[in-house]
Image (spheres, helix red, strand yellow):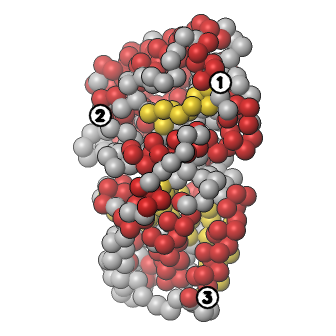
Amino acid sequence: MHASRLPGSLACLVVLSMTAAGCGLSGGSGSGDATAGACKVDKANVGSGKLSGDVKGQITFQTTNLKKDFGGFFNGVIKAFQAAHPGTSVKWIDDPGDNTFTQRTVADAQACTLPDVINLNAPTATALTKAGYLLDLSVKDPDVAKPFVPSFWKSATFKDASGDSIHTTLPWYTGGVLLTYNKDLLKKAGIDPAKPPTTLFGLFADYEKIAKAGKGKFYATMANPIWRIPADFDQMNIKVLSADGKSAVFADDPRTTQWVAWMAKLYKEGAMPKDSLSSSNDPSTLYSQGKVAYGSTNPSFVRFVKQNSPSIYARTGVGQQPYDALGRASAGAPQYISVAATSKHAPVALAFAEFLTNAENQTAWCKDPNVVIFPTTSASLEDPFFQNVSGDDPFSQARKLVADQLKTADTNQTNLSPAVQNAIVSQVQLAMQGKKSPEQAVKDAQAKADELLKQGS
């Protein structure tokens, strides 16, 4: 499973390319052909007007890396939905969520074979919304927003081809963001695990201490900046895009260059494995081997360590992600559920998407003892399970920390298209390799991002 900064987010690495002719929705409740992207669809799926029709037929439901650990739960949800809606059938498939996720998903959309109901991260939702392949949910069901926490519902908007923000996703679950670390390795570097840094540059200073202590035997973190852009910028309250989202402005803030300079310095000094600069791997494996001091920022990472490396789990601590200039925690971009505008049984797909994300099902899944995730519905967050957290083990502490964060956490993270994000990451990588100065890399990153934004990429 994944949330912000987990493997599913590696889809950001893929450069998305769509012709303007293949973008957007047309048609509506009137007569004539309707299209979503380049696909002919039922005219009721697009344009204005509430979606109606019989909730009958077969749909395909796709998750991302969930079947292995949560097969029992989701099979139960599917069974309950089918029982409540005779004549429906839900086929569940599971995508690995690797670094070709966006590329494969976009290819499915262009081939008119996008799953009816699909679990998406923010970058992929950004791409599919702009290309017109997702149902405008607030138009097709005007009451769809009611169950959700307002801030999470606000985060579920993405821009269409004309630049308008529309609700093509339902917020499903969020993992929160925190520090996970090997207490023994921190102590070897002279860092007090009980006093996590309050700023990202403070965290970078700790990375530098680990580099000096590790001397290539262990490292602070992974090098690929894909994990940090734009998440670190958001936490530092660096404005990434203009208000209209049509141009990049991050180079205007001197802290962006300072951030790149830090990344280049840390890479040069050995705080990060040299071969991880362009690797799509997250810290899971190396952390579980005791070779990386800081693990994933996702709370459910603690479950992975507990299951796969008990000895490292015993040395694992959790701490607050630096609030930095934002002044509060980031909730992480939620995982989303979308309905394909190309669905041949859209009434079934919409009904199932709303059933899957309702308060009852969100609460039930979040109570699974093997996961640290949090719901996006107001009713779920009122459940005592999220209000009364006990236990001193890392897993319980992660749950408690995020439960406290969620009361004030920020959910309005910057959404970049895969193409724009990849352009920025590539320039930072050049600076980290010493092939460009931080100043030049930031300047070039903004210029390349602007060029792509003007092209609608």
SS state under label 1: loop
- Tell me the residue at 72%/13% (across/down): 217
Mark found first going from the N terminus, 1 or 3 = 3
Horizontal side, residue 164 vs residue 134: left or right: left
Judged from the image, the secondary structure of the residue bearing numbered disc 2 is: loop
Residue pictured at 69% horizontal, 12% vertical: 216
Label 1 and label 3: CA atoms lie apart by 48 Å
Q: Is residue 451 visible to the viewer in this orientation of the structure?
A: no
Query: Which residue position holds label 2?
Result: 327
Instruction: Locate residue 87, reporting x and y percent.
Output: 62, 92
- In three-dimensional space, the C-alpha distance between marks 1 and 2, rounded to whole angstroms, equals 28 Å
Identity of the residue drawn at 33% across and 25% down: 251
Q: Earlier in the sequence, mark 2 or mark 3?
A: 3
Looking at the rendering, which quadrant does residue 267 occupy?
Answer: top right
Q: Residues within 10 Å of mark 2 (few under 14, many from 20)?
A: some
* Residue ID for mark 1: 292
Give the image quarter of residue 222.
Answer: top right
Say whether residue 304 is visible: yes
